[in-house]
Amino acid sequence: MISEFIWDFDGMLFDTYPHTTAALCEYFRRHGKCIDPGEAFSQLKISIRKAFSHFGMTAEGEKEFYEIEDDLDFTPQGFPYEGVPEMLRFVAENGGRNYLFTHRDKVAIQYLDKYNLTHLFTDFVTREMDFPFKPAPDGINYLLEKHSLDPKRCLMLGDREIDCLSGLNAGISSLLFDEFSSLGNSKYTFYETTMDGVFGKVKELMK
């Protein structure tokens, strides 16, 4: 039985890719470069580091980009996927615990606050903690040790292979949410293409 659910944020709990894609395009627009939104989206779906490398983002430019992305009022805005609040409540109300492991900074928690979801989480790992980027397992290992978690009862959930690999590298199970049915060749333990499917799997694993 799984009781400990470690969630990625972007593209798993919240539909923020349109927001982040627009922020990346806006950053380069301000610096006289037009990038294709579709290409930006595809790179971001691999990882934000991959997108930065692909488009030649400088270390100095990252700070400005994050300032744009961290503006919750910048449109299009991010919002939780349909069914996510109910799923998080189900876990919390049925003996499970939710954790967050994201490359996003504390703005992820501000998003959770905005939608009154923060109280459903036991702990958070965000960018400020300076763990190596996924697929490194360090953020998960931190949660396992801090909360004395049994790896057999833990599940990492995310929308990219690096999310699943971070879980597998930490010795726990993983679930890939493949919204666009494009990542079937990735490494994972469980695979779902809809949020209804994810919710169903969560219920099944908690039995």
Image: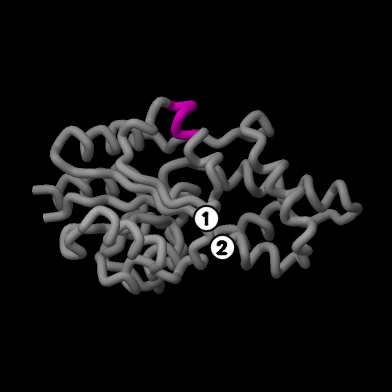
Q: Are marks 1 and 2 in contact (CB under 8 Å)?
A: yes
Q: Name the residue tied to disc 2.
A: 47
Which quadrant would residue 84 be assigned to in this image? top left
Task: Please give the range of residues in magenta.
Answer: 111-115
The residue located at (81%, 53%) in the rendering is 28
In the rendered view, would you say 30 is above or below 55?
above
Question: Going 62% across and 65% down the picture, which residue do you hit?
Answer: 49
Label count reads 2
Residue 186, horizontal then vertical, whole percent: 40, 71
> Is residue 47 shown left or right of residue 135?
right
| Dot 2 crowding, Cα within 10 Å, few <14, some 14–19, many 20+ | some
Secondary structure predominantly adopted by residues drawn in magenta: helix
Q: Give the colouring mode of the picture.
A: one colour
Instruction: Answer whether residue 61 is visible to the viewer in this image.
Output: yes
Q: Which residue is mark 1?
A: 103
Q: Amino acid at mark 1?
A: His
- x, y percent for residue 87: 28, 37
Q: Secondary structure at mark 2?
A: loop
Residue occupying the point 28% across, 48% down: 197
Task: Please tell me how crowded label 1 is: few (under 14), some (14-19), or many (20+) other residues with Cα within 10 Å.
Answer: many
Please tell me the numbered disc located at residue 127: none
Q: Is 25 above or below relative to 187?
A: above
Where residue 10 appears, x then y in whole percent? 50, 48
The answer to which of 21 and 69 lies nearer the viewer is 69
The structure residue drawn at horizontal position 38% and vertical position 33%, both measured from the top left corner, is: 118
